[in-house]
Image (tube, helix red, strand yellow):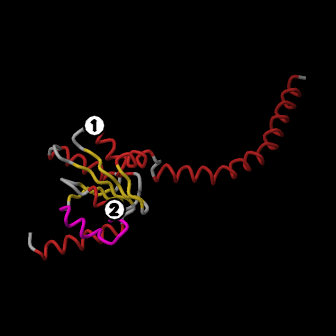
Amino acid sequence: MDRVTKEAQVTELKEKLARVTSIVLADYRGINVPMVTGLRDEFRKVQCEYKVFKNTLVKLAIKGTALEGMSKFLEGPTAMILSYESPSAPAKVATKFAKEQEKFVVKGAYFEGTIFDAKGVATLAALPGREELLSNLAGCLLSPAMKLAGQLMGPAQTLVTILKQKGEEAAAA
């Protein structure tokens, strides 16, 4: 690979890393092409990107940034799973795949300025996803309105019940 190509890859990688919310690093040795293709598809479903760069180029791209601590994981074949939206999505998919395929080993991760080891990635994978957090937030925001609606409808329902009972009593008499 010539110098111009390497510089272009480092520039591309720096641009990607500037937009990323979380990164998972994994060793993919022993995983065949159909498995990697399926894994890439799983990552695409959750809006993540599975890429393999040369470790030396990654080290150049992260030098002097908050990601520099990840260089300790850049030994041997390393895949980078980049997420631009959901911080826990790449960790969830990678952890699940690692349980199914023992040759796929999660090395570490980056999230919000913190570098995690493999145990930290498992913890990150346990976090609720973006959709789940949004639905919980929506539930919290709607709860007071639902309670108010119930309180306002209560007297009207009681009135309807009383009128119905009085109507039945009048019809029976």
Q: Is residue 2 left or right of residue 95?
A: left
Look at 15% across and 44% down and name the residue there.
32
Q: Is residue 92 left or right of residue 170?
A: left
Tell me the quarter of the image containing the C terminus: top right
Q: Amino acid at mark 1?
A: Glu
- Is the residue marked by circle 1 packed among few (<14), some (14-19), or many (20+) residues within 10 Å? few
Q: Could you tell me the amino acid type at mark 2?
A: Gly
Q: Is 58 included in the stretch rendered in magenta?
A: yes
Does the magenta-highlighted stretch encompass residue 167?
Answer: no
Task: Provide the residue designation for mark 1.
Answer: 100
- Front residue of 38/24: it is 24
Residue 24 coordinates in the image, percent (x, y) = 32, 54
Which stretch did the figure color magenta?
A: 54-68
C-alpha separation, residue under disc 1 versus residue under disc 2: 28 Å
Q: Which residue is mark 2?
A: 69
Q: Looking at the image, which residue is at 38% across and 49% down? A: 121
**Relative height, residue 82 to residue 1 (above, below):** above
Which residue is outermost to the left? Answer: 1
Q: Main secondary structure of the magenta part?
A: helix
Of 100 and 116, nearer the camera is 116
Q: Give the percent coordinates (x, y) of residue 6.
A: 15, 71
